[in-house]
Amino acid sequence: MVPANIILDTAKKEKVDMIGLSGLITPSLDEMIDVAKEMENQKFDIPVLIGGATTSKKHTAIKINPEYSSGIIHVHDASKSVSVSQKLMSEKKSVFKNEINEEYEKLKDSYNNNKATKLISLEEARKNKFICDWDNYNPTKPTFEGVKYYDNIPAEEIVDYIDWTPFFNAWGFNSRYPKVLENDKTKNEAQKLFDDGTALLDQAIKEKWFDAKATIGFFPANSSGDDIILHNKQLNLYNLRQQIAKRGKKPNYCLSDFIAPIDSGKKDWIGGFAVTAGFNVEKIGQDFADNNDDYKSIMIKVLGDRIAEALAEKMHEKVRTELWGYSKNECLNNKDLIKEKYVGIRPAPGYPSCPDHSEKLALFDLLDIANNSKLKLTESYAVYPASSVSGWYFSHPDSRYFGISRIDEEQLIDYADRKKMEKERLIKIFPQVIDL
């Protein structure tokens, strides 16, 4: 990490318009708070952009923004830095800063209100688990067990699965596609951006810039409490359970609820996947940057993300209708897929229902990623290359997405014991949900 004094001294010397801080490892989060405090002490009046694998808008709003009064803005990925920087350099920069501050105040208030919500004990949460009707449900057996690897998937077969809304979001448009192209306030600029994006996408397809790969696996599994047991691999997948007090008859969900219990007498399966747009996206983006074309450098990375997400959608459809085949008669268009009208879910480690990024280690091991798509995990468990998506497949018709918003120390200790991992290490991996 670069010391705060070097960052600030350099900023003064170069007379910069803004400072960017990137956090790739968890200790960077505390360092960013210290930088913000020191900037306030030294009466800086330039904005700070916050980004990197370990950061989040919530952490920025709650922990960093209160320490500095001249503008703290979380930037989800590099592609958004262009539009954010443009707004910060425009005549309306004060309006933009005020909008950000208002948004962060709402996030902070929401967090504080959430903190006030009662947590129940882990025992109570487990008693209030979601119970599937396993007596009247027989899990569908996949067409194979183990791993299949798909290499050099033509981009032409992927593009129809693209969800364009995040493409526009990445460039600062808040509207959904195609409405963003119809709104009088945004349509001209949005249409130009869309034309640029589709033109570069056409070039990328024609010149075969993408090297799309997919690895899919199915494994016999049963649940035991909050864990999922993979029989043939003698391996457990570890999960957290919601602990927020629920109203009415709402259950406290855990992903293991959607896998047949080991004492149910039913054989069940879990799937895993990892897809990528390929390593070329990073290389071509750097080539554009080296030629001083930052616009196309960012554009190809945004398109790479769209290709990776589209491939995840395409492969999930193939899993449901063919490879696993539990929804063979499915007939959905792309709008239906974007709205997730299909049966089953594909949660990813690090996301709301399974916030522990380190479970990617088990996923990558199961899929033999080192010998298949050759994706890598960084120290903070981010996937490289960035235009990649990985996660689990659940087939039960009642499976659904949910969030683990808060857990207490009791569940943290229980989880650490099951996972055989130090509690302090876990706190650094997913601090946002731990209420200590």
Image (cartoon, helix red, strand yellow):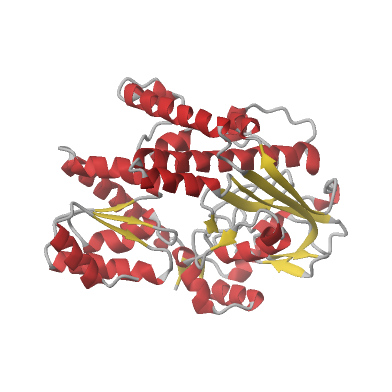
Nearer to the camera, 290 or 168: 290
Residue extending furthest front?
291
| Looking at the image, residue 282 lies above or below residue 406 | above
Q: Residue 222 location in percent, x, y?
A: 79, 61
Residue lying at the far left of the rendered structure = 43
Q: Is residue 105 above or below residue 26?
A: above
In depth, the one of 261 and 387 nearer the eye is 387
Q: Is residue 356 visible?
A: no
Residue under the point 30% across and 24% down: 185
Residue visible at 64% across and 57% down in the picture:
374
Q: Residue at x 21, y 68 (%)?
A: 37
Residue 84: image location, x then y, percent: 29, 44
Q: Is residue 417 placed above or below 95 in the rendered structure?
A: below
Q: How many marks?
A: 0
Q: Quadrant of the N terminus?
A: bottom left
Is there any visible trace of residue 359 in the rendered image? yes
Given residues 72 and 249, the one toward you in this image is: 72
Based on the displayed image, in which of its 4 quarters is residue 319 positioned? Answer: top right
**Residue 290, percent across and down?**
37, 47
- Near-viewer residue (196 or 434): 196
Residue at (37% x, 35% y) in the render: 174
Q: Is residue 210 left or right of residue 190?
A: right
Where residue 425 sits: x, y (%)? 51, 76
Image quarter (top left, top right, bottom left or bottom right) of the C terminus: bottom left
